Amino acid sequence: MYDMGSSVAFSQKDTLYKTFSIGYNLDSAKWAALYLIDEERPLSLSGKTSIIGDVYIPKAGLTTAYVDNKAYQGDKRLVIGAKKNSGKTLPPLSAGRLAMFKQFIEKNHPGDSSLSHKDSLAQSFLLPTRYVNFKKEFQSISNIKFTGNVILMSDTTITLDSTVIAKELMVFAKTIKIKSGFHGNCQLFARDSISIDSNCRFAYPSCLGILRFGQPGLAPVRENILLGNKCSFNGIIFTYEKTESALKPMIDLGRGVRITGQVYSQGSLRTKDSVDVDGSVFSSQFLYQDAFTLFQNYLINITMNSKALSPYYLTGDLCPVAGQKKKVLQWLEAN
């Protein structure tokens, strides 16, 4: 998601190195708490829904709704911010960054295929990336610490247990599963699905991404990112498919999920009660699920607050709200 940089300072025989990741400031002209594409129907608000910040919504506008014997209980203005008309499609993700992802995924990466008898794996960012490629072997990983310039890859499923310690780890696989109680800082990219169990914590700047560049001849499978109940996530969550399928991608947020950062769903965003987003949500469709009914383009008991995001937050240039100015996102190591 982010570019890397290094700086070198030397005096006679003494040399110092620092490595860092690079982010982009947010473009205030494009930044919004909410963007919903225009399918010629209104967006309905109900329950304790709160939207703070500018919004891009269909021309049909906003309305309030009575759901589960409860009326809308939020601010009478409905949105505390400017209302603008949305387009028929979402602002696109960066073609250049997507091309880099595609080139990386299609490249044949050498590397180990086993982590047996290891309790830690670390690699400096001043050295070539350390790849662990499991290929077609299902892999369930536990009781190991990953640090630095390490990438796990698989043609099938990788599962990370709560006993895994991850710092700057990247994972590329068909399916990725994270067990309940996991805490870490990582970037996870899958072709089909990412499933996060309840009570997981992802530190900034983490990333969850679905990347599908086309799978001709295969039966369609819905791409899905699931965050279980009471998860906390700091960073970017997105879905991307090059060729639109009948089963649109979905990001599914469980009860009590808290996100600090950005959500970009090329398909649907489904929520349950008490979801809180400090940042922005861009989606083609909203779904709300209660015990009996699925509501389409309803926001119920959710908070979206673009103004609550730290002014020091930086994004990746994949996102359509990325500005032009580059800054140091994170100092990674010094030697």
Image (cartoon, grey):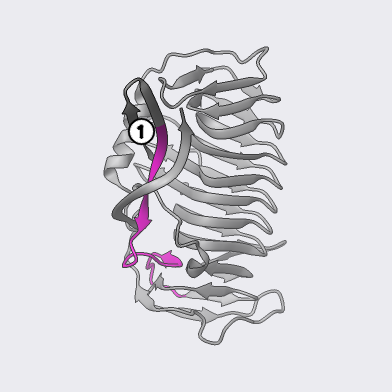
Residue positioned 56% across, 28% down in the render = 147
Drawn side of residue 119 relative to residue 205, left or right: right
Mark yes or no: residue 1 visible: no
Magenta span includes 35? yes
Q: Secondary structure at mark 1?
A: strand
- At label 1, the amino acid type is Ser
Within the image, what quadrant is residue 36 found in? bottom left
Magenta span includes 43? no
Extent of the magenta region: 18-42
Residue positioned 48% across, 33% down in the render = 333
Task: In the displayed orientation, state which residue is furthest to the bottom.
Answer: 76
Image quarter hosting the N terminus = top left
Residue positioned 66% across, 75% down in the render = 67
Within the image, what quadrant is residue 47 found in? bottom right
Drawn side of residue 171 relative to residue 258, left or right: left
- Depicted 183 relative to depicted 140: above or below: below
Within the image, what quadrant is residue 311 found in? bottom left
Counting from the top left corner in percent of width and height, residue 70 is at 69, 79
Counting from the top left corner in percent of width and height, residue 231 is at 66, 51
Q: Which residue is mark 1?
A: 6
Counting from the top left corner in percent of width and height, residue 89 is at 33, 59
